[in-house]
Amino acid sequence: MDLVLQLLFTGIGIGAVYALVALGFVLIFRATNVVNFAQGEFSMVAAYLMVVCVELGLPYWLSFVIALAGMALLGVIFNLGVYYPLRHRTYLPVIIATIGASILLSNSVLAIYGPQPQVLQGWFDTPGIQLGPVYLDSQYLLIIGVTILLVLFNFWFFEKTLLGKKLQATSQDKEMASLLGISVSTMIMITFIYSAVLGGLAGILVAPVLFVSIQMGSTIALKAFAATIIGGFGDVAGAIVGGLALGVIETFGAAYISVPYKDGFAFLVLIAFLVFRPQGIFGERVAEKA
Amino acid sequence: MKLTRREFSAGLAAGLAAPALMRGAWAQGATIKIGMCVPVTGPAAEQGLWAQNGAKLALAAVNKAGGVLGKQVELVIEDDQTTNPGIVLAFSKLAAQSDIVAFLGSIRSTQVQAMAPDVIKVGKPVMIGGTNPDLTHSGNPWLFRFRPNDNYSGRVIADYGVNTLGKKKWAIVHSTDAFGTAGGKALTEALTKLGAPPVLDQGYANQSQDFTPVVLAVKQSGADVLGTYFTFENDLGIFARQLRQLGVNIPWVGSPSVVAVSSTKLAGPALFGTYGVADFAEDSSDTAKAFGKAYRDAYKTAPDNQSAWPYDAITILSAAINKAGSTDPNKIRDAILATQKFAGAEGEYNFDKNGDGLHGYNVVKNDKGKIVYDKHIDFND
């Protein structure tokens, strides 16, 4: 039983990381109908920004604010440089452009910072707490907490605020939205900024656990992408549930079946979903779009 | 006179080529050339620089002592881009210069494997640092290794754990890539020979974000000592931290990554008290200490195996050419293989018929973040 609880906690913790990155995927997909393959690199860039600021001797909170502000700026640049010029083309050139951007981002960081992984201290001084037989890593607790908060915030933002409703309208039907006086390009700009900040937040939160390296983004993003499909592409709740489910499934699969095939379980689940329920857990919206 | 475009191009080409040609002709007789394939770009560019530093340090010493066959030695560097196609290209560029007498290859086994067929075709000695045992055991007479191969790391880990620490219940954790699988196998074999077959043999996939299942498996196995082969330092760091968090504090003897500078930095206190094998340890011998001092003086930074093996390779290669009295590849080969009891920065070189120079490892300990030399274990076979 102790074993199960310990595995459950880590599974949910790592799942929350996937969920955070998956959220970024979903938001951009809803607004632009393309998958942003540079979403994982957003996490990586933010973590490096954070490392740079902390190394410069800035306080942690200030570094955090600067890193997220930097991500907002990156979102603007990304929108203007990668999406905007191709917005009237089909989805394919845009997807390829995001892949190109992801290669550019990771190699730029490699050129500036070198290949050695870096350390980023966590938010808390205590590494974790022992709760009976289970050890709770404080950074994972924080990640789970932030994920819950973000779910609530997203619900409030998209359902209760005018801006959120405008964003939703844009993602559902751009022509109709623009007929109603909504500036579509502004809404898409906001979506890119928000996604970049979200991806950055995930990167900064996960950095103390997984260290800061060039590959950190791509490894998480691959799982997050799977989580997005499992949850139902384009659904915010689906991304969260898909991420958590993936984290728990792969942790238990590794513990009880095989460690080397841990990544295999995630993709087995993905394949099962693609075959039996391609629209994902919460798939109605995707069906509507198709 | 009217200059046609063709005449202009021909003149331009000749003008551009002339200095290079003249330099080539001049260099033909004046220096002995050694080619070096090394990462100048790509993920290992930084380590590539250290390798060049080590080689240049040895080169300066050789030249100061009168050079080779009465001539100064010159290093011709070509970028291998840290990739397999890159090193094949770099080596063919160097091999095309017929006045290069010998080469330094890579520290990465996979790159050495990639260039090996061309090495046979060229038929000149190539010094390597890759540690896959097969490299010198597959009938290629031109590869000479300046680091101990992985058979020895497994044997040294097992020997140290069983005979020095007195532990017999082993858990082995290894990466499932080529390096980790071969290492895990070598360690299992060595332990079985010592009468202590492992109670757990646990593989993991590289870039795992979470090691909880692995740590719990180690915990449940009841092992009293841990042996590891980790490929990537960030995997090692995550594992080490989770190991301590979940209360596993048994002695730990690992492959070189456990005591690598970057893992020490990443994992911090989680690696305190661990042992690792290292082919270079500054305190292991007087030659290593002298190399360390010279390196620090020249480059203001600490040396490691990346710079130690090229240093030894240039030193031993130069001595061998001098002893051979000629740059004939076969004579150089015989002279390298005849090198015995040669004190190098990495250890004492006793070349065997396969071209392996070293037959043991240093065991070092992480003493509160500082890597200290513990003992050297050598084998005769």
Image: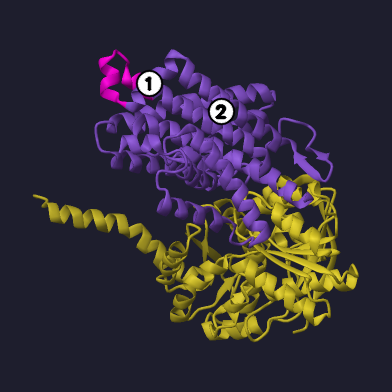
Chain colours: A purple, B yellow
* Mark 2: amino acid: Val
Residue, disc 1: A187
Q: Is residue A187 magenta?
A: yes
Going from N to C along the chain, the mark reached first, 2 or 1, is 2
Q: Chain of mark 1?
A: A
Q: Position of residue A220 (x, y in %)?
A: 54, 45
Q: Is residue A100 magenta?
A: no
Q: Which residues are magenta?
A: A173-188
| Quadrant in which the C terminus of chain B appears | bottom right
Is A102 on the left-hand or right-hand side of B56?
A: left
Q: Chain of mark 2?
A: A
Q: Quadrant of residue B253?
A: bottom right
Q: Quadrant of residue B310?
A: bottom right
Find residue A151 and name its label: 2
Crowding at mark 1 (Cα within 10 Å: few <14, some 14-19, many 20+): many
Is A197 on the left-hand or right-hand side of B302?
A: left
Q: Look at the numbered disc 1 and give the secondary structure of its residue.
A: helix
Q: Residue at x 67, y 42 (%)?
A: A209
Decide: is B68 above or below A245: below
